[in-house]
Image (cartoon, rainbow, N blue to C red):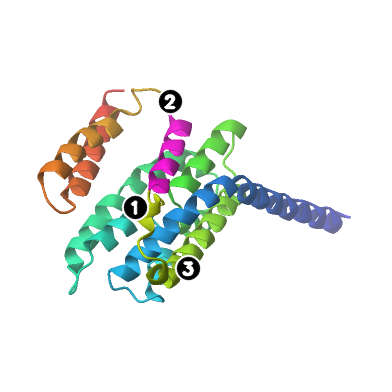
Amino acid sequence: MSTFSSSSGSLASQLSSGAEFRRGLRESLPVLIGFLPIALVLGAQATAKGFQVWQVPLMTGGNFAGGSEFVAVGLWAVPPDLLLIAAMTLLVNSRHLLMGAALAPLVRHLPARKIFPSLFVMCDESWAMGLADAKKRGVFSLPYYLGTSAGMWTTWVLFTFIGAFFGPMIGDLSVFGFDMAFTAVFLVLLRGAWTGFKAARPWFVSLAVAAPTYLVLPGAWYVATGAISGLVAAFFLAEEK
């Protein structure tokens, strides 16, 4: 009898996890649609800069951080300045430090062997959806988060590959305004995460520093100054609480 009860409980848990995974995948569909034009533009831009088609999904699947991938492609040259690209990628992706810190209190009850591998597929959108769902339901659902992440990772890798393959035939996709989709998705996430001006002050500091840097200095220095100023502002403003 006890064995039957244990098996039933295990089955119920698996069914619940499967349902949560599907719920995450289902609720991420609008974001996945927003991913399509961004991924196509990135893939096309990458091949225009000299990437081989097969190299594009390796980059997007292994890094899975759209912002830093656009920066890397934008800085790519022959021969590439790998040190500069690595440094800029690190700076752009440094926001994941704050994102992980925000998740930490919600996932302390989960084993590290599950959490650490799942962070590989964390992006801005899956993080935002997982965090919003946890705040709404009172508990962080790892299967839900993995459902959103799996759909986003698969869509991103697949459509960057398609963009790389068909980009040379179609030409510059940005003339159709597809690259604006990246900004549109970010604004939607920003609206959903908005909790007031006080919490958003590091963002405004980053913007105030990055914008004039973009206008004054050539290259991608605005990425570095914006990222560093935002992180510094977040540190010092958090100390005020």
Left or right, 44 with respect to 130, comes to left
* Whole-percent x, y for residue 58 in the image: 41, 71
User: Which residue position is annotated with label 2?
Assistant: 195
- Of 104 and 162, nearer the camera is 162
Sequence-wise, which precedes: disc 1 or disc 3?
A: 1
In the image, which is nearer the foreground, mark 3 or mark 2? 3
* Whole-percent x, y for residue 42 in the image: 37, 60
Left or right, 210 with respect to 28, comes to left
* Mark 2 residue type: Thr
The total number of labels drawn is: 3
In the image, which is nearer the foreground, mark 1 or mark 3? 3
Q: Name the secondary structure under disc 1.
A: helix
- As drawn, the label of residue 162 is 3
* Whole-percent x, y for residue 156 in the image: 48, 60
- As drawn, the label of residue 67 is 1
* Mark 3 residue type: Ile
165 is higher (above) or lower (below) than 2 = below
- Magenta stretch: give its range: 180-195
